[in-house]
Every structure is written in structure tokens, then in C-alpha cells.
């Protein structure tokens, strides 16, 4: 598991680098929460950029961990909740630089951030319904609104960076090779402002937001846990790991 951190002139970069698809297990989510929390407490850090190496930004939760041991759902839920909460509650702004796929838990990261910048090849989605799970609809709704969230959650269909920008969940779309430079340029602009003013602005914005993201996500996780106890959920995980189409039985 690699979550690299680099701090330069008040800008901290948190870099996800966990091949092949940056899918994090329970320990990985806990580590991400620890890194972001520590950076937020560092007086030398004025803004954080979360980016990733590899084919895509983040494919979410490591489904194989849960396929092997469904009881790990509690640890995974806790890790995701802590990671998303650490980003949302971070005392300094968090900029998310998304390329390639941003799925599942990746949506939780992006949807907890202050600003999302995407490359022109980025796509956003919640494929959880095809993995025997639920989750991060709270963060998807924060980015794209209720109607689009309902369609995406029910269908598992992703949307493009361009559509995400049209819906307002992405602040800008840039070429893939310019993504991190664009994120860092914005970060440097923020880092030049009064540290006290920026931290108070972050606290103020969280306080006036109509949607209580953490409470909403905690409510949502209860249904995730309930689904994980079902036969359908296990079949979906098994089918995903085995590379086949899931077969669901009518339990009525």
C-alpha cells in the first residue's frame, strides 16, 4: 500500500499509488484518514492536493478483501467513513485531481473535497450495485444532485468528466498531462492567502452547507451493512472476483 505525502511551500500532495487500480483495503482507507488528518493539523500546510498514479484515480474498495472475508465490512465501513470525514473536516481546503476512473470510494474522496479538477478522460460512477454493495451516494449527491445520483446508483452507469462539469460537481476539465499542474496552480493561489482566513472560510463553508455529509453517509452505511448480510451480496462479490455474470434468486 502506497500513499505518498510531499509538502512544498504550504502545499501538501497526497498521492495514491496502489496498482493495479488504486482500490484500497480497510487498512488503506485507515491510512488515508491518518495522513489527511495529520496534514490538517500541520501549521505548515495550507492546502492539500489528492492525486493518483496509474490507470485511474481510485476504483474504491478492494472487493477481493470482502469476497474472501465478508466480516471485514465493518472495518471497511469504518475506514471509508474516517477517510471521507478526514477530508471533509480537514482544516484546510482539499483539491482532488481526478484522472481515469473515479469509482465507489473514489467518489467518496472527491465528494468530500472542496474542489474537484478532472482530466478529460475521467469518468465518475458508483458500480456498487453490481458488487453487492451500496455506499457514497451521499457524496455523489453532493457533486451531481439527487436526480443524477438516483440514476447512477440504480444503474451503475458512469458519467464523463464533461457531464460531471456540466452538472457542477467538477470545477474544471483539463488535458490529462496538465491535470496535476492545474491542481497545484490553484493550490498555490490558495496557499498565498491568509492561513487564518482560509481555515475560517473552510469551517464557515462546512457550517452553512445544507447537507450534513457525515451524518448522511453514516445513515447510508447502515443499509450497506444490511445488504452485505444478504445472499445476493455474496453472489455479486463472487461473480465479480470470478469474472462471470451474477445469478440472483428470487427470495420472495
Image (cartoon, rainbow, N blue to C red):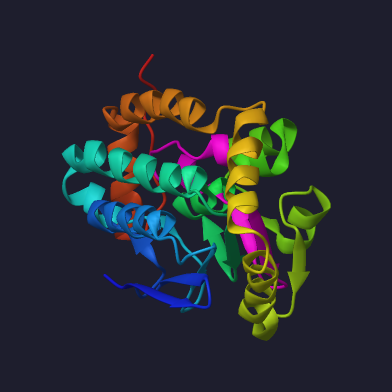
Is residue 243 shown left or right of residue 182?
Answer: left
Q: Quadrant of residue 163?
A: bottom right
Magenta-span inclusion, residue 109? no
> What range of the chain is rendered magenta?
113-139
Q: Position of residue 154 (x, y in %)?
A: 59, 35
Quarter that holds the N terminus? bottom left
Magenta-span inclusion, residue 127? yes
Out of 87 and 198, give the one closest to the viewer.
198
Name of the residue lying farthest toward the bottom = 177
Name of the residue lying farthest toward the right = 166
Name of the residue lying farthest toward the top = 252
Q: Position of residue 11 (x, y in %)?
A: 53, 71
> Is any part of residue 130 visible from this angle?
no
Q: Quadrant of residue 176?
A: bottom right
Out of 99 and 50, give the one closest to the viewer.
50
Q: Position of residue 105 (x, y in %)?
A: 45, 50
Residue sitting at x 79%, y 47%: 167
Q: Position of residue 214 (x, y in %)?
A: 47, 32
Residue sitting at x 50%, y 52%: 109
Number of residue marks = 0
Amino acid at each position: 500500500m502506497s500513499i505518498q505525502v510531499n509538502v512544498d511551500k504550504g502545499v501538501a500532495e497526497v498521492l495514491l499509488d496502489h496498482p493495479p487500480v488504486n482500490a484500497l483495503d480497510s487498512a488503506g482507507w485507515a491510512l488515508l484518514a491518518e495522513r489527511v488528518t495529520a496534514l490538517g493539523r500541520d501549521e505548515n500546510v495550507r492546502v492539500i492536493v489528492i492525486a493518483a498514479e496509474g490507470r485511474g484515480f481510485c476504483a474504491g474498495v478492494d472487493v477481493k478483501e470482502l469476497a474472501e472475508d465478508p466480516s471485514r465490512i465493518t472495518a471497511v465501513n469504518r475506514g471509508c467513513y474516517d477517510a471521507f470525514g478526514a477530508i471533509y473536516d480537514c482544516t484546510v481546503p482539499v483539491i482532488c485531481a481526478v484522472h481515469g476512473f473515479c469509482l465507489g470510494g473514489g467518489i467518496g474522496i472527491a465528494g468530500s473535497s472542496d474542489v474537484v479538477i478532472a482530466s478529460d478522460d475521467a469518468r465518475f460512477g458508483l458500480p456498487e450495485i453490481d458488487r453487492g454493495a451500496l455506499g457514497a451516494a451521499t457524496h455523489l449527491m453532493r457533486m451531481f444532485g439527487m436526480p443524477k445520483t438516483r440514476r447512477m446508483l440504480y444503474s451503475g452507469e458512469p458519467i464523463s468528466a464533461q457531464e460531471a462539469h456540466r452538472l457542477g460537481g467538477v470545477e474544471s476539465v483539463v488535458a490529462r498531462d496538465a491535470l496535476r499542474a492545474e491542481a497545484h496552480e490553484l493550490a498555490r493561489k490558495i496557499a498565498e492567502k491568509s492561513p487564518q482566513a482560509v481555515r475560517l472560510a473552510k469551517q464557515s463553508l462546512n457550517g452553512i452547507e445544507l447537507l450534513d455529509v457525515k451524518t448522511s453517509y453514516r445513515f447510508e452505511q447502515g443499509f450497506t451493512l444490511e445488504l452485505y448480510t444478504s445472499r445476493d451480496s455474496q453472489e455479486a462479490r463472487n461473480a465479480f472476483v470470478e469474472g462471470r455474470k451474477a445469478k440472483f434468486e428470487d427470495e420472495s
